[in-house]
Amino acid sequence: MAKSETGKTERSTNNGPTKVAVACQGGGMHAAFALGVLKAILERVDNKSEPKFKLVGLSGTSAGALCALMAWYGLAPKKGSPGSAAEAIKKLEDFWQDFVARTGAENLLNTFTFGALKAEEIEVPLLGLSARVFGINPYAAGYNALAAFLPTLGVRKQYFDLNELLAETCPALKKENDIDWKNVDTRLLVGASEVVNGLETVFDSDVNKGIKYPKNTASYWRQQLPLSLEGVAASGTLPAFREAQRIGSDYYWDGLYSQNPPVREFIAGPDRLEDIPDELWIVRINPQQWPHAPDSNKDIEDRQNELMGNLSLNKELDFIMKVNEWIKRPEYKNDNFVKGKKPVIVRTIKMEEEIADELSYSSKFDRSRDCMARLCDHGHKVALRWLDSWQDNKVGKYPEDAGYRKL
């Protein structure tokens, strides 16, 4: 439990509900945990009898971006719907039911691809060797021929074409005036990586609302662009499975290589205190800690991927912690770099340790219904328990709550 200097649990204070932004890490099918977490949060948002918090922001990268988008889209006012938490929950559930393997052919394809990745984790006893049995080049003619042939086998285009699935699920984002941008209350940030110039890229719903942010500048190597379905697809573009997503004249890969997920933009930018959340809740998919030093090829690959997935997030959270520290120091109170800023409490929602330990790099690619349902149920259970503790002012804060054990 995080405590202030007075010994009481630290909690943001304001005159109304606590303004909260929720940031969802990417992690392939492990992001089904975030599906369950978001469902629990949205259930509380819809409880008008006791509004303890207001959801003002969502953020995500890769599969976390898919979760964040669906929640945001359901909440957003658009033609034919004012948006609601109930609609957001349904949108999340429907999307994931379409994302996982549904037909017999899709289950066979999932068994093959997931099985091939699992086979790569098997070592030859004593020698410590493992064979690379699964590798595809999405630019090769054979890959394109296979993609064209899959529908004849009973594989839905939505299963292997992310752009198709997103267009079908969020049609209002394909038409310029179908979202009522003026009345969108929840901000969405989606992280991606521009490949050619190496620009950290955030697709930001605030840009769609006409709020001005700097475009790409060589001095910062980052840019904020309008939210689009192509931007969300870019965030989920692993180069081993999809060609780089082209947007205009630029090419994009997964946000794992830049921001996983974006959070700095909630704090930085135009200095409008009313737009800065009181709390930032991180849905952490990649464990901060491991039970032991990795000692097999399987464990080494798994831990490498997790560390990569946490690197950018921890740097951005460190930045927020540093700004919080500056704001508290009386000698800085009149300095320009703290004006228009306020302390932001960061908290972590994470899997139970034994569940996290059971997962591996290969299971991030298990698109079975069972995998999705298991992690979604776990996320929902963890989040409901966490929200009860948060309401009673009994949860900790970052960085102490990021791992499973005290250092």
Image (cartoon, grey):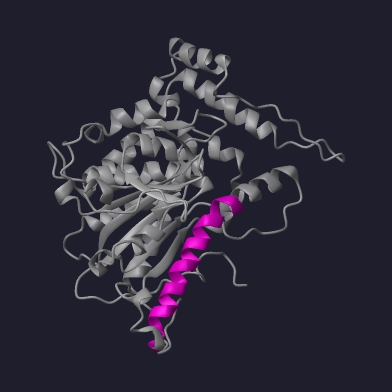
Q: Is residue 147 left or right of residue 77?
A: right
Residue nearest the viewer, comparing 214 with 115: 214
Side (left or right) of 72 relative to 291? left
Instruction: Tell me which corner region of the image, top left, top right, bottom left or bottom right, holds residue 18.
Output: bottom left
Seen at 27% across and 58% down, the residue is 55
Q: Is residue 355 visible to us here?
A: no
Relative vertical location of residue 86 with respect to residue 382 in this rendering, above or below: above
**Residue 247 percent location from the top left of the image:** 38, 33
**Horizontal and vertical percent position of residue 379:** 43, 51
Q: Nearer the viewer, residue 268 or 29?
A: 268
**Residue at 34% across, 45% down:** 225
The answer to which image quadrant residue 152 occupies is top left
Give the overall secondary structure of the magenta segment.
Answer: helix
Up-down relation of residue 211 to residue 272 (above or below): above
Q: Is residue 7 above or below residue 144?
A: below
Estimate the x, y position of residue 132 in percent, counting from the top left: 72, 30
**Residue 169 position (above or below residue 274):** above
Residue furthest out toward the front: 218
Magenta residues? 307-330
* Residue 313 percent coordinates (x, y): 50, 57
Q: Is residue 29 visible?
A: yes
**Number of marks:** 0
Q: Residue 232 in magenta?
A: no
**Residue most toward the right?**
126
Q: Is residue 327 magenta?
A: yes
In the image, taking residue 331 as reference, residue 274 lies left or right, namely left
- For the C terminus, give its image quadrant: bottom right
